[in-house]
Image: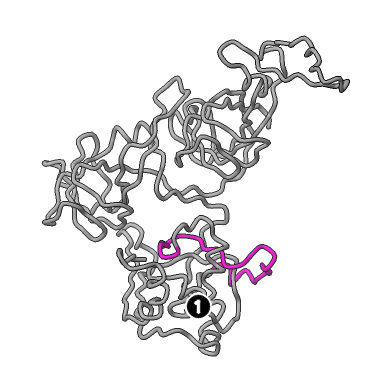
């Protein structure tokens, strides 16, 4: 969804019916490889003035409102709520169900928009669950839904050492402009490895460094956009592509690589070995992490990690004692238990080493993607906040 910079926020909201009434043609952009075996859909839209209750119900004859809607190109919260609820002015309530949408004018194809609160969800036939409803046309597009629990990374992602090594560079463009964006053609140079024609590559800049690893575990990258490779000149090592997504302005010299940004749910598998690792990074810059966060550990496929392995985040020691040690002194608080106005002498201060205390499990995670020496995990449960550098263990038979 385009944002017109400089217009006041309320102006954009009040202008939503005007934007919705424009003539629009939408066609799915798919690669040649993806097009084989799947029809190419083209949607032509005419006048789309704000719907009355009757017209909205007519475009949604089943009267069914799903829990989630998958955003398609051209969708707005105004259109989506007008279609499903016969009231486009309900968009602030739907926005309130989606804290991941920081700006209601910025939703993107593939985003999952929650329409109903958990208490409002009702069971629907399986046939309806396998279709995608298009609010702009009122039609059903027969495509599989994104699996529930799929995680999408938009602004940051994780690049393995192999992906970084094989990265290309935006070498130039036929556009006479300093900044490049969606729709522009670009030339990308690949020195290490020939690109795959028709495949989508992520345009990125280096992000935060990994911490606490004993190996080159890769790096977090800041995602700038996406480019699809259209042709490859083997002699010049130059590929021609077109930018299909621009999250930020893109300059010549930016790096290009295949970076995984979608993680589907996996089936848990039994661990076949014991293994220790550490959390070395998280795609979203965070100091503390909780449930459903994506994290990176510094052990991967060559270490015997498999998709679906479940690992424990552990902690040993007394966290209060650890936090109160400052410059060699232990901060103590004296209490006046007998009420005589004089603080009592504190008890003798035990000072066990961390190795004398038991190991406590403070979190659990599941492996959802693998690289040679790293794995991407989703935190499935936590007892307390987790930090980068936290130790992780995998237990045989679990």
- Residue 77 place in picture, x, y as percent: 47, 70
Q: Residue furthest right?
A: 338
Question: Residue at coordinates 85% horizontally, 22% vertically from top-left?
Answer: 337
| Residue, disc 1 | 88
The picture places residue 22, in percent across and down from the top left corner, at 33, 80
Q: Which residue is drawn at 17% across and 49% down?
A: 187
Q: Which residue lies furthest to the bottom in this view?
A: 54
Estimate the x, y position of residue 237 in percent, counting from the top left: 15, 41
Magenta-highlighted residues: 104-130
Q: Is residue 246 magenta?
A: no
Query: Could you tell me which secondary element the residue under label 1 belongs to?
Result: helix
If the image is split into quadrants, where does the N terminus sit?
Answer: bottom left
Res 254 quadrant in image? top left
Instruction: Please name whichever residue, 236 or 225, is drawn nearer the observer in this view of the structure.
Output: 225
Q: Position of residue 86 (x, y in %)?
A: 55, 81
Q: Please say if 227 is above or below 8.
A: above
Is 122 situated left or right of 297 in this image?
Answer: right
Q: In this view, does 84 lie to the left or right of 154?
A: right
As drawn, the residue found furthest toward the front would be 341
Q: In this view, does 82 lie above or below 221?
A: below
Q: Which of 336 and 202 is in front in this view?
A: 336
Q: Main secondary structure of the magenta part?
A: loop
- Could you tell me which residue is drawn at 25 percent across and 44 percent down? 195
């Amino acid at each position: 969804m385009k944002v017109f910079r400089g217009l006041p926020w309320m102006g954009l909201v009040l202008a939503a019916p005007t934007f919705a009434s424009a003539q629009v043609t939408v066609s799915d952009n798919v690669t040649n490889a993806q097009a084989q075996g799947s029809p190419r859909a083209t949607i032509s839209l005419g006048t789309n003035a704000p719907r009355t209750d009757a017209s909205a119900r007519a475009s949604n004859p089943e009267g069914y409102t799903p829990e989630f809607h998958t955003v398609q190109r051209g969708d707005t919260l105004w259109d989506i709520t007008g279609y499903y609820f016969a009231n486009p002015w309900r968009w602030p309530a739907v926005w309130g169900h989606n804290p991941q949408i920081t700006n209601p004018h910025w939703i993107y194809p593939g985003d999952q928009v929650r329409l109903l609160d958990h208490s409002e969800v009702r069971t629907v036939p399986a046939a309806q669950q396998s279709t995608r409803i298009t609010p702009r046309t009122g039609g059903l597009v027969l495509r599989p839904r994104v699996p529930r629990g799929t995680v999408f990374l938009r602004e940051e992602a994780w690049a393995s050492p192999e992906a970084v090594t094989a990265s290309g560079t935006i070498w130039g463009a036929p556009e006479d402009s300093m900044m490049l964006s969606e729709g522009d053609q670009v030339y990308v140079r690949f020195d290490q490895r020939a690109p795959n024609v028709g495949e989508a590559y992520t345009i990125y800049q280096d992000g935060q460094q990994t911490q606490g690893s004993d190996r080159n575990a890769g790096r977090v990258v800041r995602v700038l956009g996406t480019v699809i490779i259209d042709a490859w000149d083997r002699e010049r090592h130059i590929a021609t592509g077109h930018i299909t997504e621009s999250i930020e302005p893109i300059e010549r010299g930016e790096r290009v690589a295949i970076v995984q940004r979608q993680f589907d749910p996996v089936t848990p598998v039994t661990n076949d070995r014991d293994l220790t690792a550490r959390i070395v990074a998280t795609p979203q810059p965070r100091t503390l992490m909780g449930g459903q966060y994506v994290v990176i550990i510094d052990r991967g496929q060559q270490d015997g990690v498999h998709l679906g392995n479940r690992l424990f985040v552990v902690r040993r020691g007394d966290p209060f004692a650890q936090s109160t040690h400052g410059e060699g002194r232990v901060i103590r608080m004296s209490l006046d238990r007998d009420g005589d106005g004089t603080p009592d002498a504190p008890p003798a201060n035990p000072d066990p080493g961390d190795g004398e205390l038991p190991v406590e499990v403070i979190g659990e995670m599941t492996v959802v993607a693998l690289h040679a020496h790293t794995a991407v995990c989703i935190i499935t449960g936590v007892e307390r906040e987790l930090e980068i550098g936290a130790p992780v263990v995998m237990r045989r038979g679990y």
